[in-house]
Image (cartoon, rainbow, N blue to C red):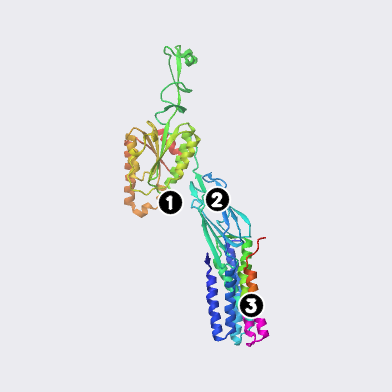
Amino acid sequence: MTLARRALVYFVVGAAGLLVGVATSQPALVAVGAALLLPVLVGLAGRPPRLPEITVALSDGRVVEGGQVELRLTLAATDACPWLDVDLGLPDRLDIVDGTARRVLALGEGETRTLEFAISCRSWGAFHIDSIRLVARDRLHLRRVEETVESSATLRVYPSVDRLRRLARPRATRPVSGSRPAAVAGEGIEFAELRFAAPGERARRINWRATAARGELLVTARLPERSSDVVIFLDALGAASSREASTLDDAVRAAASLTAAYLRGRDRVGLLRFGGDLEWILPGTGLRQQYRIADAVLESEVARTYRWRNTSLIPRRVLPPQSLILALTPLLDWRVTRALVNLRRRGYEVSIIEVDPLPYLADAEATVGPAAWRTWLLERDAVRTRLAAAGIALSAWDPSQPIAAAVERLAASA
Amino acid sequence: MSGRRLRRATAAVALAPALGAVLGALAALQSGLLPSWSVPVLVAAAVLVYELADLARSAPSSAVIERPAIAAAATGRVLVVALLAAAAAALALLAAAVPARHGLATGLVGIAAAALLFLAVYVLAAPRRPR
């Protein structure tokens, strides 16, 4: 509990007036001293302010980017609180809708009030509502008590998902049914070719229309629908950023869209986050896997580290043989480039969606000078050439455009 | 009401007692006489101005301040403090006006002043019983 500055001013001026008045036998000065001391006396003799008990609840702990949630603060006062300042501190990426995050109210004895704040979730992330500052004052505002409440409420804002129609197809499929036509003919519904019938052919495979037209026995070969393994490689080592967003934000959104699209096609999808620490999620299928990956990418942040990350540290289970590794990277860190080349040399099919950092580096040319800027651009071109030489498909993506275009370019180039 | 608006309103309200206090002080200086009855009024006006100015300064400008909180601050913080100051000044002047000799009247006035002071503190500061 702290004393207001006014109390000190009243006490010092009042005591001085009283002493000088008594010393000089001036009743007016004594009156001034008494007038300033009495409020202090009354204020200090009264009940000290007491903070109400606070409960924090979110209407929904999970929301998609751009959505809204309601935060309810329930304040239960045991004592009367004539001035209660409630200041809700929100992380940068969350905004209060239609109102302010700070309210001053009065609570009666035993009164319970619920304050509702509509929060708009501008960008993805896992946020802790951990800064609710309460300041209570007594009736004469001479004393104040302050507390910052730590809440355990966590709000998970998932990245928005773009609908992707055409995806980069892994070359190999695994012997589990899915919705991707396999490279080898077999039992399935997808048409592969017409061929001459061989001895022992099943009668249901005979294409009677083609047989009648050709005069020879022809059968329809079909492709079985199989699924594949896809590993999303998220580069969290380097990012170009502005105040509002970064390439990592865009990469996370793209990762969410790609995960949803591949899982919809019944592929197994895993995650490998290449940042300060290597983190991974084993490939899996279904909606649960989608949320598992979404929860993992929410924790992504740019890691400022100089440690060398070796791909040999990645467990074999994380990268199944013949899986497609789809990397989302701004190609700003040589360690990522080297890791991807290493993975390609180990026999994996690697494709890169290059999250273009140039929109975030608008002032860079002026800062570093045109010569350095052009050298840097040439170095980036050299990196791309090196990746292409290693057999890695690359598609550049301008984050202001939908990810679908970049993915389709990648699919076309594969 | 927004905090910014409260700040402006408080500052505007503070102008009236400030003007009154300044004019009163000027008149007292001009005439060379300070009537004893004007001391509590001047002190109350000065306290009122100080309280209003401090409220205008300390009210959070970015906050939404509810009406009951404003009412509680206006009565508890501004009016009660000003009235207490005026009462204390009047009491002190009354006590000074009592003839400085021992006697029944002096004793009675002293007891009454002490009782009034005690009563004021009790009424304003004593904990309220739960309803």
User: What amino acid type is highlighted by mark number 1?
Assistant: Ser
Q: Residue at x 45, y 42 (%)?
A: A296
Q: Is residue A263 above or below residue B31?
A: above
Q: Which residues are magenta?
A: B91-115
Q: Is residue B113 in the magenta section?
A: yes
**Residue A282 image point, x, y percent:** 42, 36
Q: Which tag is nearer the camera, tag 1 or tag 3? A: 3
| Crowd class of label 1 (few under 14; some 14 to 19; many from 20; radius 10 Å) | few
**Residue A23 image point, x, y percent:** 54, 85
User: What amino acid type is highlighted by mark number 3?
Assistant: Ala
Q: CA distance from mark 1 to mark 3?
A: 69 Å
Q: Chain of mark 3?
A: B
First in sequence, mark 1 or 2: give its number.
2
Q: Which residue is mark 2?
A: A119
Q: CA distance from mark 3 to mark 2?
A: 56 Å
| Crowd class of label 3 (few under 14; some 14 to 19; many from 20; radius 10 Å) | few
Mark 2 element type: strand
Describe residue A15's horizontal placement relative to residue A194 as left or right: right
**Residue A256 visible in rendering:** no
Q: Quadrant of residue A335?
A: top left
**Residue A395 image point, x, y percent:** 40, 38
Contact check, label 1 and label 3, Cβ < 8 Å = no
Label at residue A242 = 1
**Residue A399 image point, x, y percent:** 44, 44
Mark 3 element type: helix
Q: CA distance from mark 1 to mark 2?
A: 23 Å
Q: Which residue is mark 3?
A: B114
User: What amino acid type is highlighted by mark number 2?
Assistant: Ile
Mark 1 element type: loop
Q: Which tag is nearer the camera, tag 1 or tag 2? A: 2
